[in-house]
Amino acid sequence: MARERPVFIPELVYFEPDALNYPKGQKIYEWAERQGLPIHMTTSHNRITNLPGESDLEKYRIAKKTLVVGIRKTLKFDQSKPSAEYALPIATGCMAHCHYCYLQTTLGAKPYVRIYVNIDEILEQARQYIEERSPEITRFEAACTSDPVGLEHIGGSLKECIEFMGQQPLGRLRFVTKFHHVEPLLDAKHNKHTRIRFSVNANYVIKQFEPGTSNFYERIAAAQKVASAGYPLGFIIAPIIWHDGWEDGYAELITNLKEALPQEAAADLTFELIQHRFTKTAKNVIRQRYPKTKLEMDEEKRKYKWGRWGQGKYVYADEQAQVLKAFITEQINEHFPDARIEYFT
Ligand code: SF4
């Protein structure tokens, strides 16, 4: 049997000085001390330029194991379409190594993991956004720039966000994860205002492209636990990748989900479907960081989709995207007739 994915323990920890003025900063400091981790102070995360490592690749790998504890200064939240109105910024960066991850490019040369300690200010800002949109519901996505479940044992921020949203009649929280470390969230007073989604995929995709994450069965066992704790549950199938045997792979995925999930979990279940996409910049970065990757990124085979911020993405050609969408939708409808497919993009 495969070894259980352990929780993330960084190899280096940096603190921005003001972080220690916050209870969460103190708490993380004490945690790092108990773990016996090397702790450094830095005036700003931008100043961390001397990470060990001979080559760029080595520096990248060490940065992924480096935790920076700081303050979120920008309290203007980004949009998070189509899954929510706003991104809730509680952490940035991720210790896993998914080849296709868009953080490869959005975080550029700073791929270390950052946890923000001024959670009260962040949640106060969320409260203002909720008020502005009243009487509409406002949804916040907490996993736009990180995988916060994988960091919960260090910062505990997700549980605070869940309990905060539980008290907001018009606020909803959602996040997605590839980690199974959900124990700290199970007793949170969520009031069903938080939807926890697990990122799942065909076996081939998980095996080839998602090193450093919890395996499929760990994720499903965690999904069962959060469903039993009364959370609304969801699955994000992303990135959907066209590969040899993809039909069998995705059919098997849906069958496995069906077999593993208790009946009550299927009562309020959502699916989100996201096809693989890449930018030219991402392709170059991925090739450097994962030189042996089997990720197909051939512009000739793809459709170019213009992006809002100038740089467009390569997605599957319309016919291919339609075939993927139709097949997976049919599988979901057959096995989970009551589930809601929120979007395919
Ligand atoms: Fe990126 Fe998510 Fe993989 Fe982390 S788990 S590397 S955030 S895709």
Image: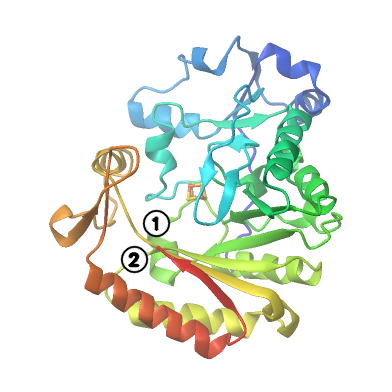
Marks 1/2: CA–CA distance:
11 Å
- Residue 209 image-quadrant placement: bottom left
> Is 60 displayed left or right of 169 in the figure?
left
> Is 339 displayed left or right of 130 in the figure?
left
Q: Are marks 1 and 2 in contact (CB under 8 Å)?
A: yes
> Is 182 displayed left or right of 60 in the figure?
right
- Residue 281 image-quadrant placement: top left
Q: Is residue 269 visible?
A: yes
Q: Residue furthest front?
A: 135
Question: What kind of element bears circle 2?
Answer: loop
Callout 1 crowding tier (Cα within 10 Å): few <14, some 14–19, many ≥20: some
Question: Looking at the picture, which amino acid does disc 2 mark?
Answer: Ile
Q: Nearer the viewer, residue 315 or 61?
A: 315
Question: Looking at the picture, which amino acid does disc 1 mark?
Answer: Phe
Quadrant of the rendering where the C terminus is positioned = bottom left
Q: What residue do we see at 43% from left, 50% from top?
A: 98
Q: Residue furthest top?
A: 43
Q: What residue do we see at 64% from left, 45% from top?
A: 148
Q: What residue do we see at 28% from left, 40% from top?
A: 311
Compared to residue 330, the image places residue 161 above or below, namely above
Mark toward the viewer: 1 or 2: 2
Which residue is identified by label 1?
209
Quadrant of the rendering where the N terminus is positioned = bottom right
Dot placed on the residue nearer the N-terminal end, 1 or 2: 1
Q: Is residue 7 visible?
A: no
Which residue is identified by label 2?
241
